[in-house]
Each structure stands twice: as structure tokens, then as C-alpha cells.
Amino acid sequence: MSQQRMNVQAPIERLLAERWSTRAFDPDRPVNSEQLASCLEAARWAPSCFGAEPWSYIVADRFTDAAPWQQVVEGLTPKNQLWAKHAPVLIIAVSEPIFSHNGNPNRWAKYDTGQSIICLCLQAEALGLVSHQMGGFDPDSLKANLGIPETLHVMSVTALGYAGQTASLDADFQPMETAARTRKPLSDIVHAGRWGETYQPPASAGWEARYQETTIEQLPWFYAELDDDIQQSLDTLHLTSGSALDLGCGPGTQALSLAKRGFVVTASDVSWTAIESARKLAVAEQADITFHVDNVLNSALNQQFDLIIDRGVFHCFPESNDQQAYLDTVGRLLPAGGILLLKCFHKDETCEMGPPGRYDEADIRRFFADDFELIEARSTRFGSPSCADSPMALFCVLKRLT
């Protein structure tokens, strides 16, 4: 899969997570008859109202019968023709609007045909194929050229085949193949109990999804060594030992680096998959680190630490009540004189992707004013400071007062 799902809010089955509508098909690789039959069989077993199965399909395979395949291509909109002409198989979905058992209109026919098509597409994904459903076509042309009865509804044309090279696409399509995949948040499309009542999924589920779907090295916040800003501050403050908490440890690279520097390290994260990955890293490196699955907004940690590092947690909380919960937890876990090293997205970072919280020095002073002294705040970047493409960050050194 060349695209990543961004801002995911809960784990889902791999087939659902990895399915996406590519436009890049390998024109030289046919879909064998057994695979094609499996996709159509999956479509056949979809649910339908009264078991009416209102769908029918026309399969046009360029490698077995090029003439109808060419007629389907010619029935597509010009823009769809540019890329669909490389797909070896084009499948037309047709819907019967009348119940066969009583002759009444079937108002669920289109809905059920859609269910059948997604079954086909998911089966294709399971077989290592790719698919792309299209609504851009001339139904009258397809009916006339392929003999589809006038009473039926032409619902979609689905391209099926193997993934091809993005570079082979028209230049207008190439950015679509590499752009991050996004969806409306659940709060926009789900109502709790009644219309207008906002539904909010647990934030921890979204983090779990990211760690289940994405290899550690591909995570945007992955950094193999100790963060340069953290290292610089430890050196400046002459911090070489003591107890340390890596808050939101993720892959565990920062916790490991702290352990190697002589700290007694505890690491926490809301994702159990992240914790397991971090634990495996610690075992491989023979590092003694204590790990906890824990949510900073409702933390069960009950010991204090000389040092807490937060490399990307606080900026996940744009709401004031969550910010206060974070402050309560950090305040409880740090004794007087304890140090918090905080790295978050800078307010000047304009990238749409990334955390919802963006802060400047004035924000940090206001948030932490009651119980912390801001020793230092400096503009920096996530990732390598020398990389101009890395997101702008704010790094802060805060000391617990009371």
C-alpha cells in the first residue's frame, strides 16, 4: 500500500485498512480465472433484503475478450479512460429495482448492490489484487453497447487487476496516489443516541490503530537516537542519573537512550502494541526498562520521577479539560525540583497533518504558570533539526516548583 491512513481513530481489520482505490494498474498482468471467480463469488454471498440478490454483473476481460472490454472503456468519462484503460478487468454492476417475488419496488436494491460490490473489492484485496469503483460513465452507452435491459440500473464500473507503477499515470493523477488517506472524524458522522449528540471514540483506540497498521520506522514521530533537543538539555542541566519517565514512549527509542545514559527508566504509552514493540527493543538491547500501558489523562502510575520527557504527547490535547488532566498527572508524578522536557508542535507549523495542538512560548507559560518555572523555550524541529521538511516544534524545559 503506497498510502497511509492518517488520523485513524480505532483499529480495524487489515483488509479494510489496506483497501484503497488506486488508479495505477499493471496493464501486462492478467487476473486469472480462479481469482476472478473468487471475487464474483464473494459478491454473490452479500446480504440483501428478502434475499432478493438484486445485483447482476458484466465482466469484461481484456485478455479473454477485448471487444466488450473496449466498449466499457469507451463508455467511461474521458478522465477515467486515462487510467482505467490499463486495468485488465472491468466489471459493470447492474441493479434490478423490482422484487421478483412480489413485483413491488425494491427501495433497497441500490443499497444491496453496493454491499455486493464492496464484498468483491475486499475479496480482491485478500487475493493481492487492487480495485477502483467508478461512477463516471455513460449508462446509456453501456446499455446500448452491451445489451443491458432498459429497466435495470447501471450502478458502477469497477476496475480490477494488479497494482502498477504510479509513474505510469498521467501527471494529474500521481499526487492522488501518494497523498495521505483521510476521512471525516467519527464525531462528524456518528450521533450518540439521537441526532446532534456528538459521539467521541476513545483517543487510545486511534493510537492503537496507528501502531498496528504502521511499521515503527514509518511512524512520523520515529527517531532512532535520543532526540537532539533532549540530549542537549540533559547535557546543559548535567542530568546523568536518577529516575526518568518516557511519557508516550511509542517505539521506545527515547527510553532506551535514557537507560543507556544511566537513568532508571519507566516508559508508558496508551497503545499496548507500542509497549510490546518497545519492550522487544529493550530486551534486544539488554536494557532494564519498566513498561506500562497507561493513559496520561487518567494515569495509574503512582511513583514520582526526577525527570519526565514528553516528545509529542501534550500537543495531542487541544481541549482545556484534557490539558488540565495532563497537568494534574505530570504535577503528581514530578516532585519539587523535578524536570519536564516537553516537545510539541509549534504554532507556526501550518501542515494540516499532525496533532491538533500547536503552541508558542506564551501558551506554555500560561498552561504551566501555577506549578512550573519555564527555564527555557526554543524553536526547533521534530526529527533532524537540519532537515527543513521536518515539522516546526517548540522545545521547553520546565521545573516543578511545589
Image: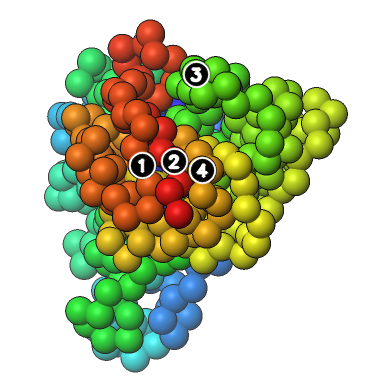
In this orientation, which residue lies closer to the viewer: 271 or 63?
271
Residue farthest top in this picture: 386
Marks 3 and 4, how far apart at CA: 16 Å
Are the residues at dot 1 and dot 2 in contact (C-beta closer than 8 Å)?
yes
Q: Quadrant of the C terminus?
A: bottom left
**Dot 2: few (<14), some (14–19), or many (≥20) neighbours within 10 Å?**
many
Q: Is residue 289 above or below residue 86?
A: below
**Residue under the point 18% across and 50% down:** 139
Dot 4 or dot 2: first in sequence order is 4
Dot 3 or dot 4: first in sequence order is 3
Where's residue 191, x and y in %?
29, 77
Mark 1 — residue? 373
**Residue under the point 19% across and 30% down:** 348
Marks 3 and 2, how far apart at CA: 14 Å
Mark 3 — residue? 236
Mark 4 — residue? 337
**Residue under the point 36% across and 32% down:** 375
Which amino acid, mark 1?
A: Glu
Which amino acid, mark 3?
A: Thr
**Residue under the point 35% across and 22% down:** 381
Where's residue 221, x and y in %?
47, 31
Mark 2 — residue? 399
Dot 1 or dot 2: first in sequence order is 1
Q: Of discs 3 and 4, which sits in the foreground? A: 4
Which amino acid, mark 4?
A: Gly
Q: Is residue 66 above or below residue 301?
A: above
Are the residues at dot 4 and dot 2 in contact (C-beta closer than 8 Å)?
yes
Residue 166 seen by the camera? yes
